[in-house]
Amino acid sequence: MRAHGTLTKWNDDRGFGFITPAAHGDEIFVHISAFPKHAGRPQINELLSYETEVGPEGKMRAVRIMRPGQDAARTRSRSNERREHGAGFLASALMMLAVIVIGVAAYKHFGIATPVLTNSSPTTNSRIAAPAATFAPASPAATLSSPTTSFRCDGRTRCGQMTSCAEAKYFLQHCPGTEMDGDGDGVPCEQQWCAWP
């Protein structure tokens, strides 16, 4: 049966002491081995919960000590750590969400950098004659082939993404990576938009 008492005597060098029961009575011997491991050294006037059993010399001794004050403090500490960890995770998640929202807003406002190919002048060395790529930001005011053209390179590359022959021709002439002229004759989307008469 579990009882309660106060540690009234303790010899730290020899690792034993005596508990005075709360219900009054004789002091009860207690050895350091009865305390929980890693709980720190026992303290005089510390409240303890314990069970008793008869020792090898036939005298009662306290065993399976519980330290209610330290256990409660440890529980509060673990609870605070969990709360702080949860708050830190929430702050990190909110920070990531804010970065994503700002990134999306910036993308919608400024657009993305679109590669614009310009042909270099032919040279005798074919390895140097490859087109040089320069990057310019996509914007509504981009330079177009004619003043009335309202098309702009926006990442579309296939015929199924076009809405007219004029748009397909513009993309073929001005936008890199298009896949709309399978036979290489300079006329895009012949089966969908730019069919020969």
Image (spheres, rainbow, N blue to C red):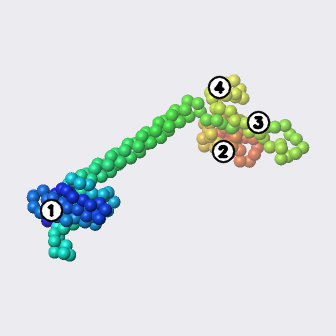
- Residue indicated by mark 3: 118
Q: Secondary structure at mark 3?
A: strand
**Residue 152 visible in this rendered orientation of the protein:** no
Task: Work out how far the residue at label 4 is from the one at label 1, CA to CA, in angstroms.
Answer: 94 Å
Give the class, few, some or many, for how many residues have Cα within 10 Å of label 3's Cα (few <14, many ≥20).
Answer: few
Disc 2 marks which residue? 191
The part of the image, by quadrant, that contains residue 172 is top right
Badge 1 marks a residue whose secondary structure is loop
Question: Of the residues tagged 2 and 4, which is closer to the observer?
Answer: 4
- State how far apart marks 3 and 4 are (Cα): 18 Å
Of label 3 and label 4, which has the lower sequence position? Answer: 3
Which residue has dot 4 on it? Answer: 141
Foreground: 144 or 184? 144
Question: What's the mark number on residue 27?
Answer: 1
Q: How far apart, in angstroms, are the residues tagged by discs 3 and 1?
A: 98 Å
Q: Nearer the viewer, residue 97 or 137?
A: 97
Q: Earlier in the sequence, mark 3 or mark 1?
A: 1
